Amino acid sequence: MNKKIYKQFIVVLFKNYIFGSLMAVFGIGALFMFTTLDISVQETITLLTILIVSLVIMITVEISVFLKHIRPIKTAFYKENLTIDDLREAYKQTHRFPLLTVYRIFGPHLFGLALPAMLITYISIQNGFLDLPFYYIGIAFGASILVAGMHSVIEFFLSTNAIKPILMTLQNESLANHDVDFAHQSHLYLSIQRKILLSAIFISVFPLLLFSLATHFRFTEASIPLLAEYWSWAVFVLIVSIIFAIYGAYLLYNNISEPIQKLEDGMQKIQLGQLTYQNDVYSDEFSRLISGYNQMVSGLKRKDQINKQLLDSLFTTLALALDARDTYTAGHSVRVANYSIIIGKEAKLDEETLDLLRKSALLHDIGKIGIKDSILLKDGRLTDEEYNEIKNHPVIGANILSQVQPKEEMDPLIPGVKYHHERYDGLGYPEGLKGEDIPLFGRIMAVADAYDAMTSDRPYRNGMPVNKALSIIEEGKGTQWDPYFAELFLLYMKNNTLDTKNFKQPV
């Protein structure tokens, strides 16, 4: 991979660290230390020395932890023959990196600086190098926690922006060389709720706490006898500020999370094939997102409708092309599909099942493409040997459809194609299935196929009258055909007059 991107990443992290440290440690910390304390020049030099020594210790400890955190990412850019596991670990570590930055600041960064500083300050006070009360050390440690908190907020958001080129590079590498798309895997290392809540507390409350401590020092240095009254007032203000910050963060989170949740729910529905619009009730940037989402759904619906029309046309055209081999059976597949839909509707099948039934019925004779014309188009009656070969067409059709991709789209159509010549009494073919063991589509299409075969002309006979065909189906209920579906078809045909010769248009 491109090592230049990794090097640029390290440079950005270094700049961010320097910026955050200067602002938090040297800016706020030093300002707090040297502007609130009334100390001599010698004591100022002593405090600066303590700060520098502690800083060296902090950097040494923090670098060792940083190298450990960065190692999986570095490995992905420098290791030869990278595995997908190497890339996945680097990708996860990169996502965790902003949070690890916070841990480093509150771990080696804070304690690497504070503990040596507290120890050296204690020794300096004890030996007379500093003229300060010992309890100042505890207050200073509390202040350092506040400074570290503000520093961590700065570093977190800077690191969040810095990792983006690394993430994109790792995604492209895994997709190009391993055909794995990390972008499809969700990663939640720190929720928006926690980000907003913690950021609100750090940004609004911590500076106020720092100001309160600084004021305490100023009052102490000036010997103002109002500390008790001051802290009773300050604590009240701090409590109100914390409550306000938490409640404000809660309101802000709800305001942000609601449209995000709506979009997430919509995306999950799209994955399930449910293209639903989202109501746009927002007046900020989320309005654009919802509008864009709805435009996407609208486009998907249009394409889905076009694809459905193309697929439906393909099934119908293929059925007509198959029937065109024999002028005497022209339109047979379309009519069988229409009769099957009639039975399916009478049986109260749902729309999705009806659609699958229609497609299966349109292709029910696709296996005849594997039967020789000399047999399929023979003018006279078939010999036993020829009839046995004709009986292979359901299995041939099932084998043809089983090769079509995507497999999951074709699998529901195969049972109707393979078993529409099975009999309810078990004397049919190709497997001699009996009763309810025959798949649903096979039982429905058996009635539809037989009726159209009886009422259609053949080279060796004319199609029989409708009433005679219906009487044969009546007699065959429970033996040749499923009695339930046969009865539904009979009732419909008795109550509706159909011109079977012209019944060629899809229902």
Image: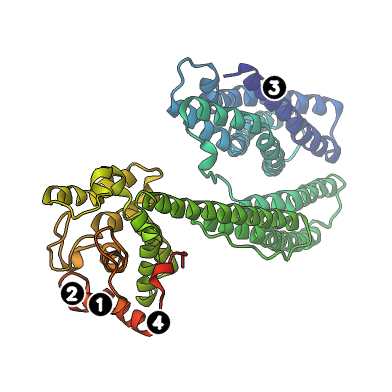
Amino acid type shown at disc 1: Lys
Q: CA distance from mark 4 to mark 1?
A: 16 Å
Identified at 26% across, 74% down, the residue is 469
Q: Is residue 116 above or below residue 507?
A: above
**In front: 106, or 225?**
106
Identified at 49% across, 28% down, the residue is 87
Expressed as whole percent of the image width and height from the top left, the position of residue 285 reads 76, 54
Amino acid type shown at disc 4: Asn
Judging by the rendered image, the residue that carries numbered circle 3 is 11
Expressed as whole percent of the image width and height from the top left, the position of residue 248 reads 72, 61
Q: CA distance from mark 1 to mark 2?
A: 12 Å
Q: CA distance from mark 2 to mark 3?
A: 84 Å
Please say if the residues under marks 1 and 2 sit with CB atoms less than 8 Å apart: no
| First reached walking from the N terminus: tag 4 or tag 2 | 2
Q: Nearer the viewer, mark 3 or mark 1?
A: 1
Instruction: Please say whether residue 161 is visible from this viewpoint.
Output: yes
**In front: 152, or 235?**
152
| First reached walking from the N terminus: tag 4 or tag 1 | 1
Amino acid type shown at disc 2: Gly
Judging by the rendered image, the residue that carries numbered circle 2 is 476
